[in-house]
C-alpha cells in the first residue's frame, strides 16, 4: 500500500465524517428551533458544515510521555579507623631499674579521647606530684625517719613554686584523674599525715596559703581519744576557712588494712572515719590515705563502696597524669617495704607518694616527663582525633569547642 493511497483514503474518511457530523448537527438544531423558519437548504448545509469543521479543527491535547530519571547510585565506603597509639612510657620512670610501669584505668577509649582533647580540660602533659609529710621539726634530733627540718621544708616549697608547681586539694585531684578537669599544668598535693594540730598548719602552711593560695590535706585519724579531742576544734576552724582539706586516714589507723583484714574491721575503718568527718567537718571524704601504707583488693573495693575516689600509698613510684599511674606489678627485692600495687587493678586507689626528702631530686625528672608526654600526645593527636571522628563522634558527639 503506497503512501499516496493511504493519504487519499484518510482524506475520504475525514470528508465523509465532516459531512455526517454536519447533517446530524442540522437535524438537532432543527428539532430545537422554536418555530420553523424557511431557510435555503444550501445555506443551512454550508453553515452546518462550517460549524462542524471548526469543532474538529480545534487542537487536541497530546499526552507527552517523559522518561523518569533513574537515580544515581551513591556508594558510601566505610572509613577504617586508625590504630590508637600505645600508652606513653616515660624515659625517666625507671632510672634505677625499678619495675614500675604506667597503668591506665579509663576503660572507654572514646570517653578518654573526648576528655583528653577537650580544650576546656587540662592539656596533655599535665602532671601531679603527691607528697607526704609527717613531722616538720626545728631540731635534727627530732627528724627521725619520716620528719623534715623546718628550713628544708621551706626550701622544698620554694623550689616547687620556682619550678612552676601549684598546690591543689583532693577534690581537684579526683576531678582531674576522673575526667581530666582543668588544673595547673604542674600540680602538687601536700598531705600532712596524722591529724596534726591547728598550730602545725598555721606555723608551716598558712604563709603559703596567704602568698600563693596553696591548700594542704590533713590526713585525719578519727579514733576518739585525747589527741583527737585536743586537735578537733582548731581543725574544724581550719576546715571552715577552706584551705585545710581533711580526708580520711582511717579510724584506728595503727592496724593497716589488707586483704587479710576482716570485713568488720574494714567496715569500721571506713564507716567511723566517714561519720566523724561528716559530723565534725561537714564533708564526706573522697580520699583514703592508707594507714601505714597498707592496702589490698578488698580494702580498695570497700573504699569504692563507700564512695572514695582516691587512695594514697607510701610508694614513691613517680608522678601521675590523667589515665596514667606508675605502679609495680611485682615485688621489688631491692625495696621490699614497697608493696606491689598492680594486682589491685584500681590505680586510683593506689596512687604513689613521695617523702619530702625524695622530692627535690625528682623535680627535673617530673618536668621532663610532663614535657615528653605533651610532645607524644601532639605527635599522635591527628590519629586520635581521626579515630574519635570515625568511631566515637556518632555516639559521643563532637569534641567541645573552647569556651
Image (cartoon, rainbow, N blue to C red):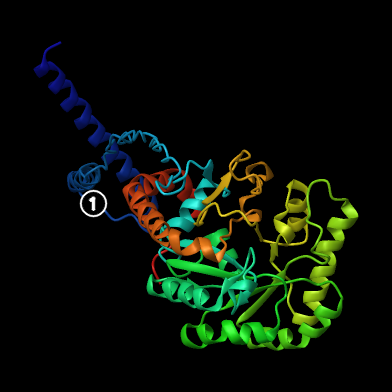
Depth order, front residue of 213/14: 213
Q: Secondary structure under badge 1?
A: loop
Tell me the quarter of the picture where residue 68 sits: top left
- At x 81%, y 79%, the residue is 227
Instruction: Pinpoint residue 219: horizontal percent, then vertical percent.
Output: 69, 70
On screen, residue 224 above or below 70: below
On screen, residue 156 above or below 280: above
Quadrant that contains the C terminus: bottom left
Instruction: Pinpoint residue 119: horizontal percent, then vertical percent.
Output: 40, 64
- At x 39%, y 65%, the residue is 401
Residue 398 shows in this picture: no
- Residue where numbered disc 1 is placed: 39
Q: Is residue 155 left or right of residue 378?
A: right
Tell me the quarter of the picture where residue 67 sits: top left
Depth order, front residue of 276/76: 276
Tell me the quarter of the picture where residue 356 sits: bottom right
Amino acid at each position: 500500500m503506497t503512501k499516496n493511497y493511504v493519504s487519499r483514503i484518510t482524506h475520504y474518511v475525514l470528508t465523509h465524517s465532516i459531512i455526517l457530523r454536519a447533517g446530524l448537527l442540522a437535524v438537532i438544531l432543527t428539532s430545537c428551533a422554536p418555530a420553523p423558519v424557511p431557510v435555503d437548504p444550501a445555506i443551512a448545509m454550508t453553515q452546518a458544515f462550517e460549524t462542524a469543521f471548526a469543532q474538529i479543527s480545534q487542537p487536541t491535547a497530546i499526552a507527552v510521555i517523559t522518561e523518569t530519571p533513574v537515580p544515581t547510585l551513591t556508594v558510601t565506603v566505610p572509613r577504617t579507623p586508625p590504630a590508637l597509639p600505645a600508652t606513653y612510657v616515660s624515659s625517666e620512670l625507671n632510672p634505677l631499674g625499678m619495675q614500675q610501669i604506667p597503668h591506665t584505668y579509663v576503660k572507654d577509649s572514646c570517653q578518654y579521647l573526648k576528655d583528653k582533647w577537650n580544650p576546656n580540660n587540662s592539656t596533655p602533659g599535665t602532671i601531679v606530684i603527691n607528697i607526704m609529710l609527717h613531722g616538720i621539726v626545728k631540731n635534727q634530733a627530732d627528724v627521725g625517719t619520716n620528719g623534715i627540718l623546718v628550713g628544708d621544708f621551706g626550701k622544698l616549697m620554694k623550689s616547687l613554686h620556682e619550678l612552676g608547681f601549684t598546690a591543689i586539694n583532693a577534690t581537684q585531684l579526683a576531678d582531674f584523674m576522673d575526667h581530666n578537669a582543668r588544673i595547673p599544668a604542674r600540680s602538687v598535693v601536700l598531705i600532712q599525715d596524722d591529724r596534726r594540730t591547728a598550730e602545725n598548719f598555721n606555723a608551716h602552711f598558712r604563709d603559703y596559703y596567704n602568698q600563693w593560695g596553696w591548700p594542704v590535706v590533713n590526713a585525719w585519724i578519727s579514733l576518739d581519744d585525747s589527741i583527737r579531742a585536743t586537735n578537733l576544734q582548731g581543725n574544724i576552724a581550719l576546715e571552715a576557712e577552706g584551705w585545710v582539706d581533711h580526708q580520711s586516714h582511717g579510724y584506728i589507723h595503727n592496724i593497716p588494712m589488707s586483704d587479710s583484714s576482716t570485713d568488720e574491721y574494714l567496715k569500721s575503718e571506713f564507716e567511723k572515719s566517714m561519720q566523724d568527718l561528716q559530723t565534725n567537718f561537714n564533708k564526706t571524704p573522697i580520699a583514703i590515705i592508707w594507714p601505714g601504707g597498707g592496702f589490698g583488693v578488698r580494702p580498695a573495693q570497700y573504699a569504692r563502696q563507700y564512695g572514695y575516689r582516691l587512695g594514697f600509698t607510701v610508694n614513691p613510684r613517680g608522678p601521675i597524669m590523667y589515665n596514667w599511674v606508675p605502679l609495680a606489678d611485682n615485688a621489688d627485692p631491692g625495696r621490699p617495704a614497697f608493696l606491689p600495687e598492680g594486682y589491685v587493678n584500681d590505680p586510683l586507689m593506689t596512687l604513689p607518694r613521695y617523702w619530702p626528702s625524695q622530692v627535690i631530686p625528682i623535680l627535673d625528672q617530673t618536668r621532663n616527663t610532663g614535657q615528653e608526654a605533651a610532645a607524644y600526645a601532639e605527635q599522635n593527636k591527628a590519629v586520635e582525633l581521626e579515630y574519635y571522628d570515625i568511631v566515637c563522634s556518632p555516639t559521643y558527639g563532637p569534641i567541645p569547642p573552647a569556651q
